[in-house]
Image: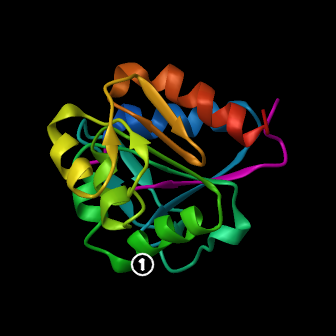
Amino acid sequence: MLLTSKKAVILVETLYNDREFWYPYYRLREEGAEVCVVGPEAGREYRGKDGIMARADKGMNEVQARDYDAIIIPGGYAPDHMRRHPAMVSLVKDFHAAGKIVAAICHAGWMLASADILKGRTVTAFFAIKDDLVHAGANFVDQEVVSDANLVTSRKPEDLPAFMRVIIDKMAGR
């Protein structure tokens, strides 16, 4: 197991993409990482687009970037709900400022734009939010995964294997 001493946050909000949440959750756990699910409220359950429930271990005001190695933001409609919470946006911004891994897939690029961390960065995402990311200052490319320093982005659920390979390698210090 590559990540036995590592800790990651996965953000959750209503209507998250089930595959983009659960695939990273279980891959990180499989590699030995401690995974903390963070939502607006600790203990609350959030329903994914496909109906699978995910319970937040901690609320958005209970975690700090300094205690974790990475933050992963799944897509779906959840990022639009997440960015309505200033504390969730600040958490992403804090991870970025600390040089920690910030990973976003599909529509999760909206959180990166709201955190104002895209200027001059090369990213990918679901094609429908390309304009949003470009207007936030990003260089958008259409690739299954893009790694730009501490920022890791992917386009869609089919890209999850490549997305997680890069995240795990970065967390392992490779």
User: Would residue 15 be found to the left or right of residue 61 on screen?
Assistant: left
Identify the residue at horizontal 29%, vertical 44% (top origin).
48
Pick whichever, 113 or 12, lies toward us: 113
* Residue 109 drawn at (x, y percent): 33, 49
Identify the residue at horizontal 41%, vertical 70% (top origin).
88
Residue 172 is drawn in which quadrant? top right
Which residues make up the magenta segment?
A: 1-16
Q: Residue furthest front?
A: 120
Crowding around mark 1 (Cα neighbors within 10 Å: few <14, some 14 to 19, many 20+) is: some
Which residue position holds label 1?
87
Pick whichever, 41 or 134, lies toward us: 134
* Residue 44 drawn at (x, y percent): 40, 66
Assign the C terminus to one quadrant of the image.
top right
User: Would residue 128 be found to the left or right of residue 85 on screen?
Assistant: left
* Residue 7 drawn at (x, y percent): 71, 53
Identify the residue at horizontal 46%, vertical 25% (top origin).
160
Query: At label 1, which amino acid type do we have?
Result: Ala
Instruction: Determine if the magenta segment contains residue 49.
Output: no
The answer to whether residue 59 shows anywhere in this view is: no
Instruction: Determine if the magenta segment contains residue 4.
Output: yes
Residue 86 is drawn in which quadrant? bottom left
The answer to whether residue 65 shows anywhere in this view is: yes
Q: Secondary structure at mark 1?
A: helix
Magenta stretch: dominant secondary structure:
loop
Pick whichever, 152 or 38, lies toward us: 152
Image height of 50 relative to 144, above or below: below
